[in-house]
Image: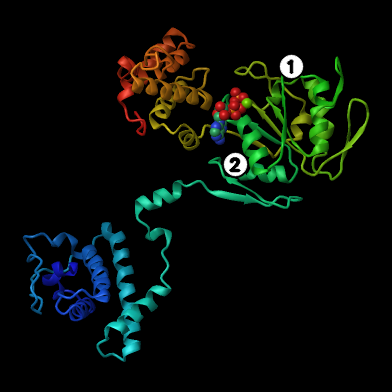
Amino acid sequence: MYSVEKYKDIISTTDADTQKRYSIIEKLSKGLTVENDTALQMDKLLTEQLDLEYGDQTDPATISPASTSTTNAPAKPTNKKPKKRSASTSKKEESVDEVVDSFTKLFEAIKNQTGGSAPDEATMKEAMKELLKDTKISFSNLDNDLKKQVSSQPHVIQYQLPGKKEPGAFQKPDIPVFQSIVDDLVMGHVVMLIGGAGTGKTYMAENLLAKQALGRQHITINCSQWTSPTEIIGGQTMDGYQEGKLIEAWSKGHVLILDELPKIDPNTAGLLNDALAKTKIENAVIFNARKESFSKHPDFAVVMTGNVYPNTDSIAYGANNKQDLSLLDRVSGNVYFIEKNPDLEKRILQNEMIWSVCDKIRSVIEEMRYEAQISLRFMQTARDSYNLEMQRVKDKGKNGVKADEGKTFKGAVDSYISTFTNVQQKNIREKIKYDEIFEDHYYRNMDKDKEVY
Ligand SMILES: Nc1ncnc2c1ncn2[C@@H]1O[C@H](COP(=O)(O)OP(=O)(O)OP(=O)(O)O)[C@@H](O)[C@H]1O
Ligand SMILES: [Mg+2]
């Protein structure tokens, strides 16, 4: 019942404080035979301390077996010396020190209450309560597994925005620059997000920034060389006058998203210049195609996205145009490069196996400097194909489609790889150990919660 009993032999070699603690437990428990709450609590604490210091010396060969004897036999002396502490046990030492510290405090409290005489049970309980009252458990005290669990919980943050009564609360995404971008938008800065295809720029602009962080509606212009002035500042159409999206967002306080801005014709982009220069000015006025004036709503904000920073014509992203310096000046200081984000990808995919295969292909592409990339969009396609395939494997053709017939993870990867040249395909297959993983759909037997490489 009292676990400290296993240290009976060691106790007499320990320091006076430890011996004193043991003897109190013995007294309260009438020689470790009576179940006594206080003694049990002290037993737990003392055992934890002794486990840390002498835990590896309690094997049956060195210690007498736990006894259920009702005698109050004194602890037997032993030749064992307390273990020397090495540098590698410094963590252990810290924990031991914490326990020793707690005990010292406890004994001080008991001494104060009893004037040094042996305490009765009620006094002990009182002293313990007093000690525990101010005891705080810090993050570092937590068990490693628990620490991991706590750290993986999404953080909920709140923004108090100017002119908004209710702060918007949402789960902060694992994107390092996220807070900075929100700050920029709240300050009226025009933000530009630059990143490879499928890294999540549009999703971030529309969902995470406009909808979730700012709690505002958004209007998106999908920019291309065909984007017309009508779409921006309004104009006559077959159905009559149509208001421009810039004007709508400006006057109603929506977030204007200029998606793939570098693809717009630089002359058309010029129509944005006036408005983008005034985003920090209260009630600033702009004009639509009919020369009607519109004053700025305080919630108006602008996010541009693009694959490249448009100060040169891009080779990799052919349809991007070099934009006018005056337009680029509107975003200077607020340009963010959105890189691949493995933590975010893994959290979105919920499938370590798929992620690791995609990530491996990505590293091969980077290593071999191929003009291609693997995006979060592809990873999601691969994951969804895998899920469907595994469902069919489970169904064993019950629903009329065999697992191999429809879309599979292998199918998605094959299709992706097929877009490379023959030599590149060979290299990619070799480096990702394609034959091992994909032959006979071997990956179906792999653990989806484990990385492959
Ligand atoms: N934080 C996220 N949570 C969930 N899904 C996301 C997140 N970010 C991106 N996605 C998903 O990843 C995919 C790619 O995102 P998105 O279309 O925003 O990329 P992009 O960088 O705008 O690509 P492109 O340059 O091709 O326009 C989409 O299917 C999107 O739904
Ligand atoms: Mg996009």
- Coloration mode: rainbow
**Residue 46: x percent and y percent?**
24, 70
Residue projecting furthest to the top: 422
Q: Quadrant of residue 354?
A: top left
Local SS, label 1: loop
> Could you tell me which secondary element the residue under label 2 belongs to?
loop
Residue that appears at 29% across and 66% down: 96
Residue 375 on image: x %, y %: 52, 25
- The mark found on residue 225 in the picture is 1
**Residue density around tag 2, few if under 14, some if 14–19, many if 20 or more, within 10 Å:** few
Q: Earlier in the sequence, mark 2 or mark 1?
A: 2
The reply to whether residue 305 is in sight is: yes
Return the residue nearer the eye: 146 or 423. 146
Expressed as whole percent of the image width and height from the top left, the position of residue 186 reads: 72, 45
Q: Which mark is residue 177?
A: 2
Outermost right residue? 291
Please state which amino acid type lies under the numbered disc 1: Gln
Q: Which mark is residue 107?
A: none
Residues under labels 2 and 1: Cα distance?
30 Å
Q: Is residue 84 visible?
A: no
Question: What kind of residue is marked 2?
Answer: Val
Using the rendered view, name the quadrant where residue 41 is placed.
Answer: bottom left
Quadrant position of residue 139: bottom left
Q: 208 left or right of 261? A: left
Whether pointer 2 and pointer 1 mark residues with C-beta atoms closer than 8 Å, the reply is: no
Q: Between residues 331 and 271, which one lies in front from this camera angle?
A: 271
